[in-house]
């Protein structure tokens, strides 16, 4: 079982780690470039509202959920990368996408160990783990422990939180 507290600690200190990757991203740049040394992006609600459509804002900034089987990517079988729709941070790879039957794009692991953050979500009396973009904090979906091998995890993600790059 993955130790989520450890992941949190790793995420917290990710920006301090200079060892792994010499390349760095510019905060706010809309690229799919991924770097362990990323800087967090903080914007006001007004700034996010100006940048995102109403539906994107609702899911990404208010932790909304798109209706199953209505999103752009639940059935996308093309090879490529999925980046954050709000900030362009690389989040998932098509290689880890699998058919879950849920109507939402599903992956068994993130693109790397630092791109996705986890938050305990006890809304509606459920005990779930919310996943967010580690760079901009945008809501992506939830992670469940009923996924396929090799991780046994199912990252259930809103299409609207993602942008596919072939
Ligand atoms: Fe983001």
Image: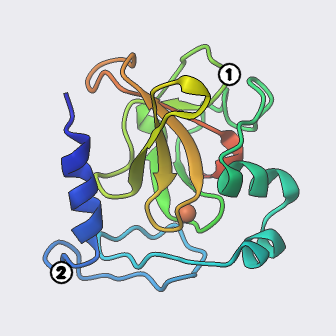
Disc 1 marks which residue? 103
**Secondary element at image label 2:** loop
Query: Can you see residue 166?
Result: no
Q: Residue at x 83, y 50 (%)?
A: 55
User: In front here: 124 or 26?
Assistant: 124
Point out the quarter of the image occupied by ligand 1.
bottom right
Of the pair 84 and 144, the residue shown nearer to us: 144
Is residue 90 found left or right of 141 in the rendered image? left
Q: Quadrant of residue 127?
A: top left
Q: Earlier in the sequence, mark 2 or mark 1?
A: 2
Specify whether tag 2 is near ligand 1 (CB below 8 Å): no
Residue 95 in the image: x percent, y percent? 42, 36
x then y, percent, for residue 115: 39, 57
In the image, residue 74 above or below residue 93: above
Instruction: Find residue 60 and name its label.
Output: none
Q: Is 40 placed left or right of 112 in the picture?
A: right
Identify the residue at image location x=36%, y=17%.
148
Residue sitting nearer the eye, 165 or 26: 26
Residue 163 located left or right of residue 113? right
Q: Which picture quadrant has residue 83? A: bottom right
For label 1, the SS is loop
Farthest right residue in view: 54
Q: Is residue 157 above or below residue 67?
A: below
Q: Percent position (x, y) of residue 44?
A: 68, 78
Q: Quadrant of the N terminus?
A: top left
Q: Which residue is mark 2?
A: 18
* Circle 1 crowding by C-alpha within 10 Å: few under 14, some 14–19, many from 20: many
């Amino acid at each position: 079982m993955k130790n989520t507290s450890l992941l949190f600690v790793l995420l917290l200190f990710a920006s301090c780690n200079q060892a792994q990757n010499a390349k760095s991203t510019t905060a706010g740049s809309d690229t799919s470039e991924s770097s362990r040394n990323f800087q967090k992006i903080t914007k006001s609600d007004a700034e996010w509202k100006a940048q995102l459509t109403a539906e994107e804002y609702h899911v990404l900034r208010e932790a909304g959920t798109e209706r199953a089987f209505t999103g752009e990517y639940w059935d996308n079988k093309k090879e490529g990368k999925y980046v954050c729709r709000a900030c362009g941070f690389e989040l998932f790879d098509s290689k880890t996408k699998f058919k879950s039957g849920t109507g939402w794009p599903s992956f068994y692991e993130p693109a790397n160990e630092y791109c996705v953050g986890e938050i305990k979500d006890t809304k509606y009396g459920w005990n779930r783990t919310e996943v967010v973009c580690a760079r901009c904090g945008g809501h992506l979906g939830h992670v469940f422990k009923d996924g396929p091998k090799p991780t046994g995890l199912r990252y259930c993600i809103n299409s609207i939180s993602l942008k596919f790059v072939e």
